[in-house]
Image (cartoon, rainbow, N blue to C red):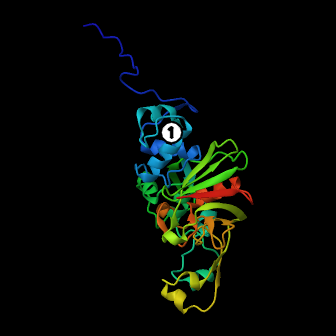
Amino acid sequence: MPIPPPRLITKTNVEPVPPVGFARPVQNVFEAQLALARLGISSGSLDGVIGSQTRSALRAFQQKEHLPVTGELDAATKERLLRAATPYTTYTVTTNDLARLQPLSSTWLGKSQQTALDYENILELVAEKSHSHPNLIRRLNSSIVWTNVAAGTNLKVPDVAYADAGGKAAFATISLSGKVLEAFDANTNLLAHFPCSIAQRVEKRPIGELHVAAIAPNPNYTFDPDVFPESAEARQLKTKLILPPGPNNPVGVAWISLDKPGYGIHGTPSPEQVGRTESHGCFRLANWNAEYLIKLAWVGMPVYVEP
């Protein structure tokens, strides 16, 4: 009996492995979130879930690319939104990572007495460094015991990094209704799109033209008990406290003060909660977005707050 010729492997029976550096259209929500982030268009913490912040990021991309603005990962958007061949990379835990971990006090006074308000655990550290939701990092590393991670442990994480800021922004806008901060160049080209938390109380939401008054990377934080009347501890404290810097500082790792007293744009120790109406008046960004924004911002830069 004759031996049949070998079956040819074509695109009809197996997808070829793309070469290193090859870019192709995104295939799912996670890949879209990752590709958008690499363009400076953040959907918040990477999680692979389609939600309001991802739809907002898609609309920003669609508008930038002159596509129908649907907020959906439709065929036209997939075709234009490209991702690199490998969406993941390896993060190796170091001794320095482990050395910086410390528990976070539950009280304002306790926080003021810490050496730093740094990460509490490796999961938190790795999730923030990879712009990811902790649940995504857990899913990608299901065999890891997170309470016992040693130096040298290799972790699978999204391969995400913002491009180097080529220059300063001309201005920024904050949409209160959209809970979004965007930065533009002098030709109104979009440079960055970030989810943003706004004030819980309507009367604490400034509208109109503001300006950047000062920029501080890795700031400390002055806790004023009068600003937190809802806190039982604050009502008992008789003096202001200075809290040390760190990613778990109340203003995160970056502070941009505005020329309206008491208002600013800053990071947060809870990036998964960004995009809500919960602040005392300031505008909160994920730490990685706040860090990127201070590269674009400059003293005097206009910030237009829109309803």
Where does residue 114 sit, x and y in percent of width and height?
A: 62, 80
Q: Residue at x 28, y 7 (%)?
A: 2
Outermost residue to the left = 1
Quadrant hosting residue 73: top left
Nearest the eye: 98 or 87? 87
Residue 16, placed above or below residue 164? above
Mark 1 crowdedness (10 Å alpha carbons): few <14, some 14-19, many ≥20: many
Nearest the eye: 1 or 222? 222
Residue 87, placed above or below residue 297? above
For badge 1, the amino acid type reads: Gln
Where does residue 113 sit, x and y in percent of width and height?
A: 63, 83
Residue 293, placed above or below residue 116? above
Q: Residue at x 60, y 73 (%)?
A: 117
Quadrant hosting residue 264: bottom right
Outermost residue to the front = 208
Quadrant location of the N terminus? top left
What SS does tag 1 mark?
Answer: helix
User: Can residue 76 be seen in this snapshot?
Assistant: yes
Q: Residue at x 64, y 86 (%)?
A: 240
Quadrant hosting residue 20: top right
Where does residue 26 sit, x and y in percent of width and height?
A: 47, 36
Nearest the eye: 239 or 137? 239
Read off the residue under disc 1. Answer: 62
Outermost residue to the top = 2
Count the marks: how many? 1
Where does residue 129 sit, x and y in percent of width and height?
A: 57, 57
